[in-house]
Image (spheres, rainbow, N blue to C red):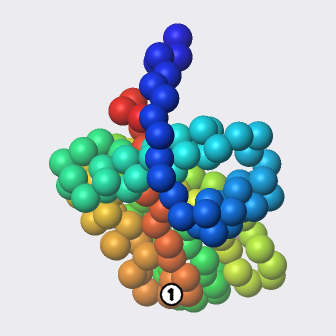
Amino acid sequence: MDDPLTRFGVAVPAPLLNKFDRIIEKKGYSNRSKAICDLIRKELVENDWAALDKETVGIITIIYNHGVREIDDNLTELQHHYYSRIVSNLHVHLDAHNCLEVLVIKGMVREVKKIADKITSAKGIKHGNLYLGTLGKDI
Ligand code: NI
């Protein structure tokens, strides 16, 4: 069941609100309330990432050339080392040489960041990125 709604008044400079309205219209929002709720939730989720002992889910993406010596073995070794945290992975052969790997990691923010650092800094990784998400319990 949805939580009860609270109405509140907000004073916003007109030009700022006009810009906001244009953006949310482009994004497909049908009203400001949903757009503002999403902004608040985004802020709550980002705030959680500062709490290192909070459980979260992270998505790591890495791009690498599979022809680089030992890179596949090293990545497999790392993923087996952190098997209890890496809940899923996806491998895409982008072209004849480049691979994209997407790893979903569940754990404390501290652990997720540590694993992401280890993997994205591994030799031969051309590009690595961590997106921190949320388990969705508190928003
Ligand atoms: Ni590949």
Q: As rendered, which of 137 and 107 lies closer to the eye?
A: 137
> Where is residue 17 shown, x and y percent of the image?
62, 60
Q: Which quadrant of the figure has residue 132?
A: bottom left
Q: Is residue 107 visible?
A: no
Q: Secondary structure at mark 1?
A: loop
Q: Which residue of the protein is positioned furthest toward the left in this rendering?
A: 53
Residue at x 54% of width, y 64% of height: 13
Residue at x 63% of width, y 69% of height: 15
> Where is residue 18 shown, x and y percent of the image?
69, 63
> Where is residue 61 shown, x and y percent of the image?
55, 67
Q: Is residue 63 left or right of residue 56?
A: right
Q: Is residue 40 above or below residue 16?
A: above
**Tally of marks:** 1
Residue at x 77% of width, y 74% of height: 94
Q: Is residue 105 above or below residue 93?
A: above
Q: Which quadrant of the figure has residue 32?
A: top right
Q: As rendered, which of 133 and 94 lies closer to the eye?
A: 133
According to the picture, the residue beneath numbered tag 1 turns out to be 124
The amino acid beneath tag 1 is Gly
Of the 4 image quadrants, the one containing the C terminus is top left
Q: Is residue 136 left or right of residue 2?
A: left
> Where is residue 69 shown, x and y percent of the image?
53, 88
Q: Is residue 42 left or right of residue 81?
A: right
Q: As rendered, which of 71 and 85 lies closer to the eye?
A: 85
Q: Is residue 115 visible?
A: yes
